Image (tube, rainbow, N blue to C red):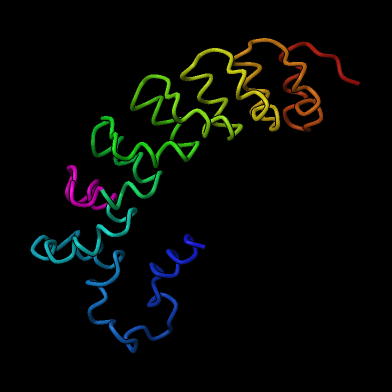
Amino acid sequence: MAGIQEEIQTMNIYDLHSNPEELHGYSTREYKLPEFAYDLAKDNPELRPKLEPVIMKDPEYALKHAMFVKNKPWPEAEPYIMKNPQCAYYYAKDVLDQRRWPEAEPVIMKDPQVAADYAIFILKRPWPEAEPYIMKDSFHAWWYASQMLKRRWPEAEPYIMKDADSAYLYAKDVLKRRWPEAEPVILKDRGWGPEYARSFNIKQD
């Protein structure tokens, strides 16, 4: 419900109207909507002090503004950026130059994709606190096991084996052998079943 409310609040109503100039507030939209504020700020440095308080309230546009307009960290916007795990990860990666961002980690760790990438590319070490979240996403559990742990990850295997793609890659890249427990899922998959069979010299009818 909260996500729907946020989407409604940030919806650009002017894009939905055939004559947006007739709508109330059209002439001052740049000072109300992050999308317009960001576009105006790019080419008008003198207006940025007035526009940035609008931009910073949207994590995506705050990230873009820090990356492409300010070209440096933007501390005032960080409380907003860190509310979105994807934006928080890319801020740490591309704005903070792959430095750790501890304040954002409780949010980042709850998104399996960016949690795995944060551990691999930012922390450059295993991230035990995030593993309960990462392991529940089959594909990123394989990715984390193969790229970070570089070993078998038994706790994640019940999740990995639910997806033929991830299970095949886990067997090939991590176990480096057949994975009998996952074969009922892998071998019945039209794409990954034959690939798995070829990789491990399994004869299929």
On whether residue 159 falls in the magenta region, the answer is: no
Q: Main secondary structure of the magenta part?
A: helix
With 36 as the anchor, is 203 left or right in this view? right
With 137 as the anchor, is 120 left or right in this view? left
On the image, the x and y values in percent for residue 149 come to 49, 16
Q: Quadrant of residue 10?
A: bottom left
Stretch of the chain drawn in magenta: 63-78
With 134 as the anchor, is 54 left or right in this view? left
Q: Residue furthest bottom?
A: 22
Quarter in which the C terminus is drawn:
top right
On the image, the x and y values in percent for residue 99 come to 26, 30
Q: Which residue is pictured at 27% across the width and 50% down the height?
A: 79
Tell me: residue 72, above or below residue 172.
below
On the image, the x and y values in percent for residue 174 come to 59, 15
On whether residue 72 falls in the magenta region, the answer is: yes
Q: Which residue is pictured at 39% across the width and 31% down the height?
A: 118
Q: Quadrant of residue 91?
A: top left
On the image, the x and y values in percent for residue 119 come to 40, 26
Tell me: residue 56, above or below residue 191.
below
